[in-house]
Image (tube, rainbow, N blue to C red):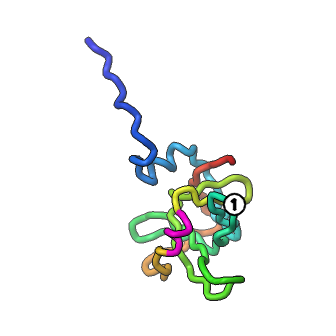
Amino acid sequence: MSIPSKPPPREWSELSFEERMERRFPQPVRVGDLIGLPVLDYFDQTIGRVRAVERTTEGKIRLVVPYGGYFSLRRRPVAVPIEVVAIAGRQLAALDMSWEEFAKAPTWTGAGAQPIAADEKIRIALYKR
């Protein structure tokens, strides 16, 4: 009898965002604690701050972050999938969403989405720089 072998590990680029999140040791966090946190890019520049956390009709969690404009002028809300960010202390990092992807993302209208209560806990990935 042979011992079944594990499949070879896939490259990071081949993983879905959900699989990437699971490899980043997601931990529970209170939704209210995410509101107001800055979302940073790879170079630690602030993209925006979390304004709301909502659940789509498909059950996916989205962080609503204002994006674009200068000095908070003409900013538009963008839905950031929870799977593409990670938390470290009092900030979030957009690990799998670039500035270009923020710019291309549609304006979030929240159609059909429900806000998640501030005292509810969700899971978010961890990171360290």
Q: Residue at x 49, y 79 (%)?
A: 108
Q: Nearer the viewer, residue 75 or 58?
A: 75
Amino acid of disc 1: Asp
Q: Main secondary structure of the magenta part?
A: helix
Residue 66, relative to residue 118: is it above or below? below
Left or right, residue 8 beside residue 34: left
Left or right, residue 59 beside residue 30: left
Residue found at the very far left of the displayed protein: 1
**Residue that label 1 marks:** 44
Q: Nearer the viewer, residue 89 or 93?
A: 93
Residue found at the very far bottom of the displayed protein: 74
Residue found at the very far right of the displayed protein: 90
Which quadrant holds the N terminus? top left
Residue 97 location (% of width, % of height): 52, 62
Q: Residue at x 52, y 57 (%)?
A: 96
Question: Residue 17 in magenta?
Answer: no
Q: Residue at x 53, y 67 (%)?
A: 80
Q: Is residue 84 visible?
A: yes
Residue 114 location (% of width, % of height): 50, 74
Residue found at the very far top of the displayed protein: 1
Q: Residue at x 56, y 45 (%)?
A: 24
Q: Is residue 119 visible?
A: no
Question: Residue 101 in magenta?
Answer: yes
Residue 99 location (% of width, % of height): 56, 68
Total numbered circles: 1
Left or right, residue 126 beside residue 83: right
Q: What range of the chain is rendered magenta?
A: 98-103
Q: What is the secondary structure assignment of the residue under circle 1?
A: loop
Q: Residues within 10 Å of mark 1 (few under 14, many from 20)?
A: some
